[in-house]
Amino acid sequence: MSDAIATTSAGASSGRLRADVAVIGAGPAGIAAAVRAADAGASVVVLDEGMRPGGQIWHHRTRAGLPRLARDWLDALDRSAATVVCGASVVDIEPGFRLAAEVRGAPLTVDAGTVILATGARERFLPFPGWTLPGVVGVGGAQALLKSGASFAGKRIVIAGSGPLLLPVAASLARAGARIAIVAEQAPAAAVRRFGAGLWRTPGKIAQAARYRAAFRATRYAWGTWATRAAGDDAVREVTLTDGRHTWVEPCDVLCTGYGLVPSTELARLAGCAIDRGRVVVDARQRTSIPGIYCAGEPTGIAGVEASLIEGEIAGLAAVGRARKAIERLDAARRRQRRFADRLDAAFAPRAELRSLAAADTIICRCEDVTAGRLRPEWSQRQAKLYTRAGMGPCQGRICGAALEHLFGWDAGTVRAPAVATRLATLIAEPTPDDAGDCPTQNRTKGAS
Amino acid sequence: MDGRIEIRVNGKVVRVPADVSLAAALLDAGTAAFRASIHGAPRGPLCGMGVCHECRVTINGVPHRRSCLEPVVAGMEVVTGE
């Protein structure tokens, strides 16, 4: 059933692909979905913004350094008949379904009867004075830059944020030769300990946590401590930390900040899928409220790689009508991982003090340089957009949206195409078979036969 | 060869590893201001994964490319700080 893929026999990718199933996102959930659907005989196209499949958690330059689980799934994706298009940003989903994407500046249209959203998550950033300085990067951001080849050797790094990502990132930066000045976790010690004590319910995570702590035993780790200010002229030079009683300044070359992950739901919102408390609503078969659109992994709630793989497998099989056995096999594990996610949320919930860090001149929307002083608590996110352009820039509110929700309780609201800032050509082009030019498609000859 | 390639950053030749992202290459080359904000303040990568658009640069004359999502390519012409 792979005749639907319209890759040309010459190997050059066309500007139009057709498939039974389009998977958006090639992280663990997207890979698992694509492998299961393709192995069941469906034609599958996978679109991902990154340079290689793997998503953020399995971001890599060479597979040798990846965990076994990651290599196994990436190998399975290679062996499958799925067509993987990297560097592809999906900007619109039309009913039917027709996906409008941009691949390194060239338009690509994908027609598919079924869509699986596996769009992952992103970091939650909470604004404080100086957070826009170069050198202030996400916790996961630093990890991503490190994995894509940036050197942090010799840099003095402060890590101040929240969540289970802080420790593994500190460990990998330390291994890469960085000097970690301090790891500051905003959550109180009691909450983190309660969370740690609950780990016996998901035993795989205990070994993980122990490994991370061992990797930077000499580093200072402080609970109930957060960054209130970053300063420097052209780049960050120092960060002010407080535990609520004492306040001090740490010099640094890099400040890593980030307050956990939030689901990336823009494409689900764009397609009209029901959202509840920031999560895409799905049933036992990973079906969203829109017939033909499934969702798997972090967009349904932040629960980590194991949950993403399970949901991806179920979504991929459900898309070809074969989910019953997989649900029987995987449902208990899926529910266990979901409970883990709920405990994670509770343990690392941002403290109230983080709401009052921004000064009147602190930028909230980095794209449009909208300061806190211009925003009014009585507005909605929509009014903020209308009056100040907050959330109207290239990132389309992906960064300030979570901050505005935290600061003012504003819901993220509706999403209109394009979901990612795109070249006009992507929106208006009716692509001809030559339009996409040199589209970097992996496995692109597969399925063409 | 040492597995490095040459790209041009603001007119200057820079030798970078062949398998890194452009954002990683620019950071290692000492770039602080990847772009200027609409009020002229320097900005650099934040999310590292294509979400924040703070690492935008001009590549071969095409503006607003997210450097964290772009592999380096020999001969690439990059302009930062715009």
Image (tube, rainbow, N blue to C red):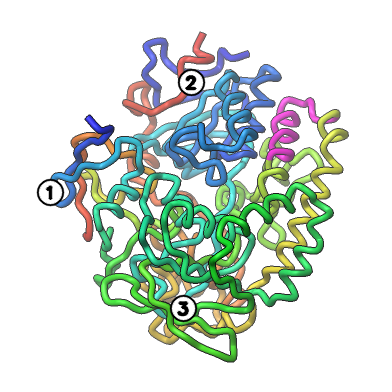
What SS does tag 3 mark? loop
Of A391 and B14, nearer the camera is: B14
Say which chain tag 3 marks.
A
Q: Which mark is residue A92?
A: none
Q: Which residue is mark 2?
A: A443
Residue A274 appearing in the image = no
On the same chain: label 2 and label 1?
no
Residue A319: in magenta span:
yes
Q: Is residue A11 left or right of residue B74?
A: right
Amino acid type of the residue tagged 2 in the rendering:
Asn
Say which chain tag 1 marks.
B
Earlier along the polypeptide chain: callout 2 or callout 3?
A: 3
User: Which quadrant, please, contains the N terminus of chain A?
Assistant: top right
Amino acid type of the residue tagged 3 in the rendering:
Phe
Q: Residues within 10 Å of mark 1 (few under 14, many from 20)?
A: few
Q: Residue A15: x percent and y percent? A: 40, 27
Q: Which residue is mark 1?
A: B12
A67 relative to A1, above or below: below
Q: Is residue A33 left or right of residue A355?
A: right
Q: Quick check: marks 2 and 1 in contact, CB under 8 Å?
A: no
- The residue that appears at 56% across and 48% down in the rendered structure is A267
- The residue that appears at 14% across and 44% down in the rendered structure is B13
Q: Residue A305: x percent and y percent? A: 66, 45
Q: Which residues are magenta?
A: A309-324
